[in-house]
Amino acid sequence: MEFHISNRMSAIRGSAIREIFKFAADPSVISLAGGNPAPELFPNEQLAEIAQDLLKNQPVLSLQYGVTEGYTPLREAVKARLKEKERIDREGDDVIIVSGGQQGIELSTKALVNEGDTVIVEEPSFIGATNAFRSYGAHLVGVPMDEDGMNIEALEKAIEANDNVRLIYTIPTFQNPMGATMSVEKRKALYEVAKKHGVVIIEDNPYGELTFDGTKLPTIKSMDTEGLVIYCGSFSKILAPGLRVGFMCADKAIVQKVVVAKQVSDVHTAMLPQLLAYEFMNRFDIDALIVKMRANYAHKCATMLDAIETYFPKGVFHTTPKGGLFVWCDLGHGIDTLKLAPTCAANKVVYVPGNTFMVDMDKPCSALRLNYSTMTDERIVEGVKRLGVIFEKELETRK
């Protein structure tokens, strides 16, 4: 039978990252493609202890329906942490627990964007967000990224040149895919531009805790006096992604509509993962776990950057992240990294082609995203070395 696919879904492609995972399942393949946290950092023993206790002593709470807004003690703990760590404490805001930060983005779009409305995104940007916007028929407009974040002059021009601009989407800290961090000056400027034009900002901050040296810049949400910023966070990168526990902080009027939208989507985030997240924060030191993560990723990132400097052809651009999980490289010279990816896969190393993160995914792109979080030092170095040989041969053909 031939099925009739809805207009809103027919033009949306599955994530190339997920497709690459099929190659990565082969243990002989070195995957520099994913965005998974390091599994050796999962606090599995502590979570097992908590789960056993919950299922034995609080089975009804753990297994029964919950409220859409989220488990109240967890919501309060998130609010307290946002106030302490991010200086987010606006009186008119509220917090809802969502099924991963991705759902916060999707439900915000569902609540605020009509088909044909404009959503402005960083370019390159996170495909999970851009596909969420595409799924609601949004008109996507990309704003180029500088090394210190979104180009603010181009942002204002994009707002002025397009009708019905509803959202500006940004990952200001350790951006996916570039690893770049928006300067404080640009954060302030972005907020002022949004306020001037009455546009809501989605500030996506899944990596903000993963700063290598402990230095944290103020969130855009902490500057928000008007309720213009929707802040999306997650336990995926600081606890475990499989729990699918995230949170969203926004003006109460937005949260109320998101609650209704979530009731339609999944009623509420699963209770057992919410309880696991809350009890871990209550019984153990999540900040000590985050410190371990920072050291682990700082070391792996330095290993990758050293390997890039050693094995990549001279002149290949790369970012130098100060946190997060990603390095962005650009080969230049009109090379299409999507077309080059099968050659690399045949040599047992994979990355994510840059076109995946662009508004126009059909346009050739000479950039690529590398991830260092899940591989050992030896496999990071060997993977970069293999890529370097292939990139060098490709550049030779361009001379």
Image (cartoon, rainbow, N blue to C red):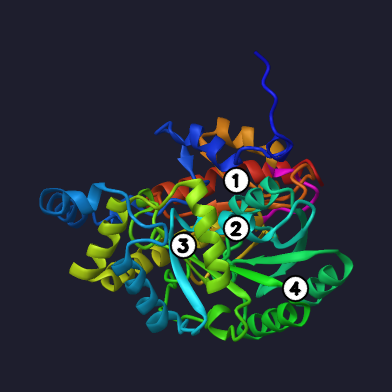
The answer to whether residue 307 is visible is no
Instruction: Return the mark for residue 301.
Output: 3
262 versus 24 height, above or below:
below
Sequence-earlier tag: 1 or 2: 2
The answer to whether residue 321 is visible is yes
Query: CA separation, marks 4 and 3?
Result: 26 Å
Secondary structure found at label 3:
helix
What's the amino acid at mark 1?
Answer: Val
Residue of label 4: 151
What's the amino acid at mark 4?
Answer: Asn
What's the amino acid at mark 3?
Answer: Cys
Instruction: Return the mark for residue 177.
Output: 2
Secondary structure found at label 1:
strand
Whether residues under marks 1 and 2 lie with C-beta atoms below 8 angstroms apart, the answer is yes
Query: CA separation, marks 4 and 1?
Result: 24 Å
Sequence-earlier tag: 1 or 3: 3
On-image quarter of the N terminus: top right
Q: Nearer the viewer, residue 193 or 114?
A: 114
What are the residue bounds of the magenta stretch? 330-337
Q: How crowded is the residue under tag 3: few (<14 C-alpha within 10 Å), some, or many (20+)?
A: many
Residue of label 1: 352
264 versus 19 height, above or below:
below
